Image (cartoon, rainbow, N blue to C red):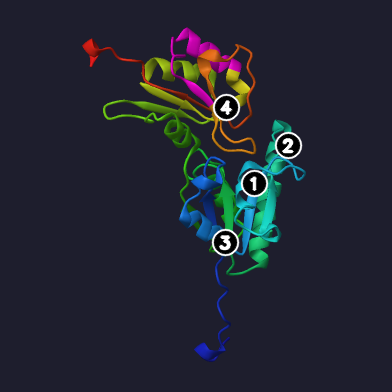
Amino acid sequence: MYGNEADLPDPVPFATLIGVGVGPGDPDLVTFQAVDTLTKADVVFVPVVSPEETGRAEQVVLGFVEAWRVDQVVFPHDAGDGPAAWDAAVAHVADWLLAHPGAVAAYATTGDPGMHSAFPAFARAVAESVPGLEITFVPGITPMQAIAARRGEPIVEPGESLAVLAGPPDEERLRESLATFDRVVAERVGPKLPAALAELATADRLDGAVVGAVGGPRGPQLHDAASLPADARLPYLSTLVVPARRRTEATR
């Protein structure tokens, strides 16, 4: 027992894990708050498919943060490695936080950490092993925002409906969305692009649809969906943006 408050041990400071949205892959679209958070964090975790590969978020982060403060978290795309890879990634981050009481760790993710991102679930899993962990978010610009802005088109207008499908999109859900919503966005459409193009053609929604990415090592890569071959292949992180059907003056 302790005789008085002066004899009590100092409380262990709680660590902080911040999900930081670094935009669609273009360093010019990273917010001031994101840069400030990344540069002040004790460590910046970045998700990658392989240790030998520089991920999309990592490419952006390295433009603002020294490489020695960047720590890769590996998430293989191989579905067979899913649960084991997830557990290993959670343990990796949790172990670092437990070894650095009171530290501030940033976790960089493309787009926005609160929208169709694995970060919320990942952070909750880490918190199960790190008592008192504080979790916060720094919002980021999403790929659909960047693509729409580059095309000079709105994402959605007043009175319209919008469906945003976390990808790779299920064909049935995409079909239902095209039939029900004025505008449709499908993220991570790369692996399902041929099927998505077929659904657009069947629904007569190819007109004005665009697919691709604004960020990445090769810069903006946007394609008119109507001009792509039926068996087109694009990178995994490609986003499909389907505008509202064109309206005639009589229907306005």
Q: Is residue 148 above or below residue 224?
A: below
Check the image and name the residue furthest to the right.
52
Q: Nearer the viewer, residue 146 or 239?
A: 146
Placement of 189 over or under 247, stated as above or below: below
Q: What element carries label 2?
A: helix
Left or right, residue 167 beside residue 84: left
Q: Does the magenta stretch include residue 206?
A: yes
Q: Which numbered circle lies on residue 39?
A: 3
How many residues crowd mark 2 within 10 Å: few (<14), some (14–19), many (20+)? few
- Measure the alpha-carbon separation of dots 1 and 3: 15 Å
Between residue 215 and residue 167, name the one nearer to us: 215
Residue type indicated by callout 2: Asp
Q: Is 161 left or right of 168, judged from the image as shown?
A: left
Dot in front, 4 or 2: 4
Q: Which of marks 4 and 1 is nearer the N terminus?
A: 1
Q: Which residue is drawn at 57% across and 61% down?
A: 39
How busy is the neighbourhood of tag 4: few (under 14 within 10 Å), some, or many (20 plus)?
some
* Circles 1 and 2: CB atoms closer than 8 Å: no
Q: Mark 4 points at which residue?
A: 168
Q: What separation in Å lies between label 1 and label 2 (alpha carbons)?
A: 24 Å
Tell me whether the residue at label 2 lies in contact with that at label 3, contact meaning CB atoms closer than 8 angstroms.
no
Secondary element under disc 3, as helix, strand or loop, is helix
Q: Where is residue 20 in the image (x, y as percent from the top left)?
A: 53, 51
Q: Name the residue under label 2.
A: 81
User: Residue 191 sits in which quadrant?
Assistant: top right
Which mark is on residue 59?
1
Q: Which residue is drawn at 60% across and 15% down?
A: 194
Residue range corresponding to the magenta coloring: 194-211
Of tags 4 and 1, the one toward the viewer is: 1
Circle count: 4
Sequence-wise, which precedes: disc 1 or disc 3?
3
Q: Residue at x 30, y 14 (%)?
A: 247
